[in-house]
Amino acid sequence: MVLPVEAVVVFEKGGRVLWSRRLGHRKELKGDPINSLIGSVLVEGKGGQELRATIESYAVEWRYANEMDAVVVVAYDKSMELSVGGELLERLRSAATRLRRAQQQAEFEPRSLDKAFDAIAQDVETKHLAETRRRAAAREEVEEDDSPAEEAEPSLSVEERLRRRGVASKGAPRQQRKAGAAESVAARKKPTVWRDAPRKRVSEADAAELDYGRSSAADQEAAYQKAYMPEAGEAAAWEEEEEVETKPGWLGSLVERASGTATMSAEDVAPIMSSLRERLVAKNVAAEIATEICDSVAASLVGTRIERFGRVRTAVAEALSAAVERVLSPKRSTDVLREVLARPSRKPYVIVFVGINGVGKSTTLSKVAYYLKTHGLAVGLAACDTFRSGAVEQLRSHAKCLGVDLFERGYLKDPALVAKAAIDDAVKAKRDVVLVDTAGRMQNNDKLMRELAKLVSLNNPDLVLFVGEALVGNDGVNQITMFNKALMNFADNRRAIDGIILTKFDCIDDKVGAALSVTYKTGQPIVFVGVGQKYIHLKKLSVNHVLNALFH
């Protein structure tokens, strides 16, 4: 095999290997990268969202096969390029899932995956070779472009070749030869202008040319207006309502032939629950949570009396809807607007936004600011991300676009003290709300989590909201759990997260299981979901939307 792959492994999340294949020239792997992946990356959550890590002398990539509670891993020499690793993993994951589904409850038979892998590997290897040849051809083309022009035109005369090189024929005058050489050099390369001489002053024109990041405040504000502000007459997402469809279509094919019986038994319910579990996992619900939901639904159905000649479908649909609604229905109020209006008038309502890096906390905070401002509240922003370069400037641009006040103290300041000063300033200015932006941090970084806990302890906000991506699926459960644990361990007041905002909710199509998983596992309500880039693309989680996506 030409693929630079050393090993491919499929193992359960509990650690049991279901299938493996050694492909490399080595008799055995140096060290144990697979066990290292399980112990230091997957279990401790250090992988983040990249699904790739460097362990010892290997590059390791993986994909989750949630339907079978497994992980598919490929390991290869970290010095090699493997552009098709992602495709190899995706196709192997699909093949393993199909085989597992076909075998249903039987023990997974490893040999059943051998033939499928051989076909996948052969196809992927062909693509790898084609990509390798393409890159080699591209390198050769670059080298040819860098070679003298006459090599591409072998028919040129010797005199013409010499002239193009800047060297005249023997009979040419010396000055002509020099001019030709100078002209050739000038055509090939522009001289470097060094501006570090102590006595050489840089003109305004030179300074403007060197300022690659220049743009007027008006230009930047116009760009934010275009990107984030709604157009005239454009309705806000939070004003939209969705009605639930009362007859889940996929259940029809499952129980169409099952007429009602006097009392539903465990035998009647079992095949329906098996199909339901597969359905939930396919919609990105964690396998463990899907099983618990199915057990809950089954318990509510067994022993239920149904009218003779009635259909099982209606009873199952109602039980499913009730179970999902119980999970998603918040145990505390998620109406931020009502809570702000009910606060004591002498102090602002403080919301702290937390989360890992790159999930869109600042933009989400700005959407919430727009939502509150449109309802007549005076909003202030607090720039407490004093670590990430450009964070303060980004929030300042949002504040100008929104027309709200920004409190900031620059960089390398204590975020907890900046937040306290921002709240004190809001009291003096009689603002209704203070939205606190914080630096993104990984959930297993104790130092940064202690810093966040200090901010929460010192300022005792009314609401701590975790911002996460709906796209990460069930990894979000681990993120929120770790944030909660860190806050409760490190904060003096043992304060935990109060609610969740899921961004990019419009990008997950019907795979809304992450919302179900994260709410079920953490017990925290989803306050808002982001459904686009603009400030108006924010809405409350619709239980009806989740039901329709899960059951249709």
Image (spheres, grey):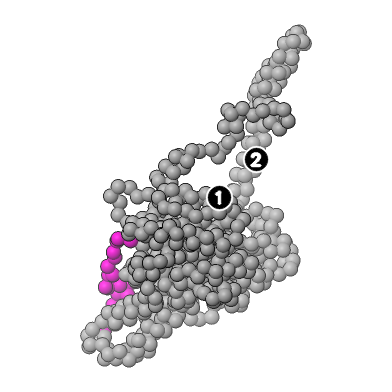
The mark nearer the N terminus, 1 or 2, is 2
301 left or right, relative to 36: left
191 left or right, relative to 513: right
Q: In front of the other: label 1 or label 2? A: 1
> Can residue 477 be seen here?
no
* Residue at 55% across, 66% down: 455
* Residue at 49% across, 62% down: 424
Rendered position, 27 above or below 1: below
Give yes or no for residue 241 being in the magenta stretch.
Answer: yes
Residue found farthest to the front: 428
Q: Nearer the viewer, residue 113 or 54?
A: 54
Q: Which residues are magenta?
A: 237-259
Where residue 158 appears, as percent x and y from the top left, is 72, 17
Rendered position, 302 above or below 287: below
Q: Could you say which disc has been placed on residue 139 in the image?
A: 2
* Residue at 68% across, 70% down: 36
